[in-house]
Image: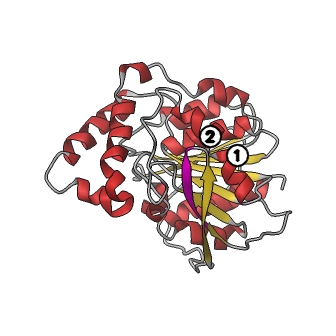
Amino acid sequence: MLCITVPRARLKYRPSSVSVSDSERDARDVFVETPRGRLFARAWGDWPRPQAVAPIVLIHDSLGSVELWRDFPGRLAAGTGHPVVAYDRLGFGRSDPHPGTLEIPGFIRDEARSSFPALRAALAIDRMILFGHSTGGAMAVVAAVEFAAAALGVITEGAQVFPEDRTLDGVRAAKSAFAAPGQLDRLARYHGAKARWVLDAWTDTWLAPTFAGWTLEDDLRRLRCPILAIHGDRDEYGSLVHPERIAALAPMAVDMAILPGCGHVPHREYPDDVLRAVQAFVRTLTL
């Protein structure tokens, strides 16, 4: 697979079997205190790290957690030479329960303003590269805007720019599927007793009438660092309109990595291709 960085161009990738080193670095687990509760985080690579090397910060999707990234963070650290940190948002994984419900539509911006300052302080993160999956992609963009002086680049994966009909249909289908006996146990493996809250936080938020007008467009216009938009052309939660809107609105250099035959979780479905795209993108950044 050939990976070339071309500003404002969509790059087509063919799935590749060429391996990227999957050697795991030693991982370090930490708990981060915030005013609303503790966050769980895991770091791969060199910690404490050289100040010249910016870490890649992973932000999970609406049902995600540190554990659900599986071996991808370790491979990312090994493949890029950058430390990687992933954390469980409040209410998810091993982080403390959320004290209430997600604010609609403000929960995406709230993540950048509430959790990120504490995470950055605890891990001494000054400059950073943000990588967000699905809703985490929108959070990565917002965090890069909120902390513009610290954000060197943004990587979105399967991110949504607005509540597209395909997105909402996918959420409705998932809500119906999770209603079947035993299906919630799949979430409980990663979120424990918080599993019901996690599911409801996703479905009730995205399907709420008050969320229908949410859009990431103003934040994209304010972004002041390069962005890589990774998207599967068979993503069941968003069409290619989303990476295309990212490319049209972001004022800095934009790369689009469109993966043929790929659904909503490229780092799990085509990890080699995602790693190659990220490696190429990171090399272009002013570190």
- Label 2: how many Cα within 10 Å (few below 14, some 14–19, many 20+): some
Q: Amino acid at mark 1?
A: Pro
* Callout 1: SS: helix
> Against 99, is 67 above or below?
below
**Which residue is located at x 76 percent, y 41 percent?**
225
Q: Is residue 115 visible?
A: yes
**Which residue is located at x 65 percent, y 29 percent?**
219
The circle drawn on residue 246 is: none
Magenta segment: does it hold 194?
no
Between 170 and 176, the one lying in front of the other is 176
Q: Considering the whole magenta stretch, tell me its main secondary structure.
A: strand
Quadrant (top left/top right/bottom left/bottom right) for the N terminus: bottom right
Magenta region, residue range: 36-42
Name the image quarter holding residue 9.
top right
The circle drawn on residue 114 is: 2
Q: Amino acid at mark 2?
A: Ser
Quadrant (top left/top right/bottom left/bottom right) for the C terminus: bottom right
